[in-house]
Structure formats: structure tokens, C-alpha cells
Image (cartoon, rainbow, N blue to C red):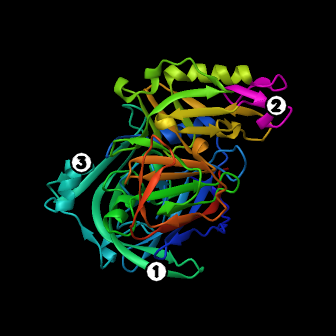
């Protein structure tokens, strides 16, 4: 796919302050495109995995311009010995990590050139565990631990990544809190992809780094090496596309928590109801209930947000009814729910509140459900999902400190300026989510910090 690249790497001035040992850091950058809502929906659909199924980060799409969604967040990782650098997407919505891997094409990972590379065989205990978890298959003909990930909406396969798993070294930067940095290496398992179709064959990135809850994810492997407690937080800044991922427990006051639904695939939540402009929507309580076959999960790798079909029409109608009379309705590029406000969007559009199990509420401003290509016409960016699934993507999660806590099986958040320092502790805490703020500390080891920089990509 032909494209012109204008790269502007701008490191954030973030420095998380760790209590305990020096924090580990990886740089993250964000790739942005001036793309339509329809294209973003297609990219999001590519990410919703049917089979196959933190540190670092994966597909976080968006833009450094307000209300303009674009391409994914990336990080650079060094793999192998001698180390080679790869640009990979950061993804909290999937677990297996992989890089493009062929010996016949320059620029791709070649395990034969790494002295520390080891291909996982079918008899390897690690492969057998992944086969049991359905994240790998045994290829008897080559005696390799293979994978075949299918991406697409529902039963439609629109992109694939296939290959085999291997173990090799990843190199991480360690910040000691005094802006001094050293290097740390650790063995991880990742996929060597020799087949990519659909948008995954695009050369704008080299692979995916997964932060899902499965044992094969990058974050889970960091936990198993005892490099971090089983907690990471991500903060994505909307205004400049920067942010940070921190391994360790943030100490910020005001964090609220809701229980995670047990799953190895996603960070599932129990969304209970939605308020628009202070008014509760008259939704059937079962619309979001897992026991009724519905799912809700937070996925920083999805650009927009997808609302279960049974809730979508009421949601859009409630917003349209609460929009200021000074915002004239219009149609823009096929988007049916668009407006031209004569004042700021905060005064022209209503606030939204998501209520979760345990009394946790997530307050959303208009920027969390609107998008615009020119800051004059604003369209509702949440999309209808006919598969009983609600996905809270980047547009919802930006400008929040989002804590993924697998020790206590809770997800926490607070509105946050991601350019500010994030104070973390290496201790564990036992949380009572019925009281969203109560906790009890228990000692634990290290914290890991990942800085995000910015990379623009403009398509012709």
C-alpha cells in the first residue's frame, strides 16, 4: 500500500515515580491517519478476534488533533541477539504477540540470525499449555508450535496472521527515577508470522504486542518472570497522542474500581446502565448482562466504541434530544448523526455516565463520543454492534489513567492529565470493590514504565 510518511517523534516528558526498585520503560509512539469513520470501523473489526486466540502497548488508534481519530499507538522493541528493532502495535484487547518473520525479505525478523532464538516444538511444555488454552496448535509435519489468528466481525474473516511460536530475548530500558537509564533483557515467547492477510499485511507496522489477560500475553510473561506485580496502568493522551504504560500500582487518589469478568480473552466488565444528560436510559437491564449472553469489555486497541444494538438507538436518540438548539443537524460522509454547533461542544452536547458493578461510574465528556475531521462538524462516533457486545475503545478511554489489576481482578480509572508524572508503588493491595476506594497493602517487587511518543502518517 503506497503512502507518504511524515515522521515527527516527540517524546513525552513523563516520568513515573516508582516506590521500590527502578522502573522498566519502553518508548511508545502513535501512528495517525486522517481517515473516515467507516475506515476506523473496518480497522476495529479487524481487531475483534474469533480464534487464537503490562512494559509495552498495541493498537491504540487516534490523533494528536482534538476529536480526530486516526491510526494505532506503537512501541519499538528490540528482539533477538544481536538485537533488531521492530515497530509493534500495543493491544490490551488481545494476548498473543507476533512480528513479521520471513528469511527471504529484508527488514523482517529472521530467527536463524539470532543466537538466542529457540523455536517451540510440540513437546515443549509451554506449547502444550498454549494448545490447552487454544492459543496454539501443534503442527506435526514441522514439529512446531503454530498459531492461526483470524480477525473479523462475527464469522467473517477479513484478516489473518499465521506462523509459529518461538522464544527469544527482548530488551527493555530501565529508568531509575533520576532520568538515568540502563538496559534489561528477558526471554519471551512470541509468534513468528509468515502469513498475513488483509490490513495486517500493511507495512506500516511489524507486529502486535498483546496485553490481554491470557498467560501468553507480553504483560503476563512479565508477571511470570517476577519483573512486576500483576498490575499495569495505561494513560493515553488525546491532545498530542502521547501517554504512558506503567507496570506497578498507581498511587493516585480518587481511583474507582469495578470487578473484572473472568476471561482469558478480554478485560470484561459488568456495565449496568447509561445516563445521558443526567437521565437514565430506559434500557432492559439484561442488555449488558453476561448471564444473558452479552459482553462488555475495555479495549484500548479499538479506535471507536461499539454499543450493543439493543441499547444503541436509545443512546443516540437521547444525545440528539439533549443537543443544544444552536447545533444544527447535518450529514457528513455517510455519518447520519452529525451536528454543526455554534458554540463549544462541551456547552452544545450532553455528558454521558456509564455505571458499572460495585457503584463505579465513568464520566464521559462529548469528546468521548464525538469525532470530527475539521473541528466544525461533529458526529456521534459510537457504532451499533449487532453481536451483543459493547466495546469501550480508545475514544472512551483516552485522558484517563486506566488500571488493569489482575491480582484483585478489578479495573480502575480516573480522569487524568497523561503528561503529568504517575506515582506508582511496587506493593500489592487487596481491594474491596463494594467500596470503590478501600485497599490494603502487601509488599511486591518492581515497576515498569513505558513512555509514548508520537508518529504521524499521512495517506495520499
Residue 142 location, x and y as percent? 17, 59
Q: Of marks 2 and 1, which one's residue comes earlier in the chain?
A: 1
The residue drawn where x is 51% and y is 69% is 26
Specify the segment rendered in magenta.
Answer: 323-350
Rounded to the nearest angstrom, the CA distance separating label 2 from label 1 is 51 Å
Q: Position of residue 167 (x, y in %)?
A: 29, 68
Q: Is residue 303 magenta?
A: no
**Disc 2, disc 1: CB below 8 Å?**
no
Question: Which of the two labelled residues, at mark 3 and mark 1, occupies the earlier sequence position?
Answer: 3
Using a 10 Å C-alpha cutoff, classify the residue at mark 1 as few (fewer than 14 neighbours), some (14 to 19) or many (20 or more): few
Q: Is residue 137 visible?
A: no
Q: Residue at the location (35% across, 70% down)?
A: 110
Residue position for label 3: 133
Residue 287 in view: yes
Q: Gap in Å between the C-alphas at discs 3 and 1? A: 33 Å
- Residue 54 point in image, percent of width and height: 44, 59
Q: Residue at coordinates 40% horizontally, 61% vertically from top-left?
A: 99
Of marks 2 and 3, which one's residue comes earlier in the chain?
3
Q: Label 2 crowding class (10 Å Cα cut-off): few <14, some 14-19, many 20+? A: many
Mark 2, residue position: 341
**Tag 1 residue:** 183
Crowd tier of the residue under label 3, counting other residues whose Cα lies within 10 Å: few below 14, some 14–19, many 20 or above: some
Label number found at residue 298: none
The quarter of the picture where residue 269 lies is top left
- Give SS at disc 2: loop
Residue 175 vs 134, above or below: the answer is below
| Residue nearest the viewer, comparing 285 with 69 | 285
Return the x and y of residue 71 as percentages of the image width and height: 59, 50
Amino acid at each position: 500500500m503506497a503512502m507518504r510518511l511524515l515522521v515527527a517523534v516527540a517524546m513525552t516528558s513523563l516520568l513515573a515515580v516508582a516506590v521500590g526498585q527502578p522502573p522498566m520503560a519502553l518508548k511508545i509512539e502513535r501512528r495517525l491517519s486522517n481517515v473516515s469513520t467507516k475506515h476506523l470501523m473496518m480497522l476495529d473489526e479487524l481487531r475483534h478476534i474469533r480464534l487464537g486466540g503490562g512494559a509495552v502497548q498495541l493498537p491504540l488508534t487516534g490523533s494528536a488533533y482534538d476529536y480526530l481519530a486516526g491510526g494505532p499507538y506503537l512501541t519499538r522493541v528490540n528482539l533477538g541477539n544481536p538485537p533488531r528493532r521492530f515497530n509493534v502495535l500495543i493491544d490490551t484487547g488481545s494476548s498473543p504477540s507476533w512480528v513479521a518473520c520471513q528469511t527471504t525479505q529484508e527488514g523482517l525478523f529472521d530467527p536463524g540470525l539470532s543466537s538466542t532464538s529457540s523455536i517451540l516444538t510440540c513437546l515443549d511444555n509451554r506449547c502444550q499449555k498454549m494448545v490447552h488454552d487454544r492459543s496454539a496448535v501443534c503442527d506435526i509435519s514441522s514439529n512446531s508450535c503454530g498459531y492461526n489468528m483470524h480477525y473479523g466481525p462475527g464469522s467473517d474473516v477479513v484478516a489473518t496472521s499465521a506462523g509459529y511460536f518461538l522464544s527469544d530475548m527482548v530488551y527493555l530500558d530501565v529508568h531509575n527515577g533520576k532520568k538515568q537509564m540502563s538496559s534489561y533483557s528477558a526471554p519471551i515467547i512470541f509468534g513468528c508470522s509468515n502469513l498475513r492477510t488483509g490490513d495486517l499485511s500493511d507495512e506500516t507496522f511489524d507486529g502486535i504486542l498483546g496485553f490481554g489477560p491470557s498467560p501468553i500475553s507480553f504483560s503476563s510473561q512479565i508477571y511470570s518472570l517476577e519483573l512486576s506485580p500483576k498490575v499495569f496502568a495505561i494513560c493515553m493522551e488525546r491532545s498530542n497522542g502521547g501517554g504512558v504504560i506503567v507496570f506497578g500500582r498507581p498511587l493516585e487518589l480518587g481511583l474507582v474500581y469495578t470487578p473484572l469478568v473472568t476471561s482469558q480473552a478480554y478485560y470484561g466488565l459488568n456495565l449496568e446502565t447509561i445516563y445521558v444528560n443526567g437521565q437514565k436510559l430506559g434500557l432492559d437491564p439484561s442488555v449488558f448482562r453476561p448471564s444473558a449472553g452479552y459482553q462488555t469489555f475495555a479495549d484500548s486497541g479499538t479506535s471507536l466504541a461499539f454499543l450493543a444494538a439493543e441499547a444503541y438507538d436509545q443512546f443516540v436518540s437521547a444525545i440528539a434530544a439533549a443537543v443544544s438548539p444552536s447545533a444544527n443537524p447535518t450529514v457528513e460522509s455517510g455519518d447520519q448523526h452529525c451536528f454543526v454547533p455554534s458554540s463549544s461542544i462541551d456547552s452544545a452536547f450532553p455528558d454521558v455516565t456509564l455505571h458499572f458493578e460495585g457503584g463505579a461510574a465513568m464520566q464521559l465528556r462529548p469528546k468521548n463520543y464525538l469525532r470530527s475531521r475539521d473541528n466544525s462538524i461533529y458526529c456521534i462516533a459510537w457504532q451499533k454492534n449487532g453481536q451483543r457486545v459493547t466495546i469501550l475503545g480508545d475514544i472512551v478511554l483516552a485522558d484517563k489513567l486506566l488500571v488493569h489489576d489482575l491480582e484483585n481482578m478489578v479495573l480502575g480509572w480516573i480522569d487524568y492529565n497523561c503528561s503529568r508524572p504517575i506515582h506508582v508503588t511496587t506493593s500489592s493491595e487487596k481491594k474491596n470493590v463494594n467500596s470503590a476506594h478501600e485497599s490494603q497493602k502487601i509488599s511486591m517487587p518492581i515497576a515498569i514504565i513505558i513512555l509514548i511518543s508520537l508518529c504521524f502518517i499521512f495517506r495520499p
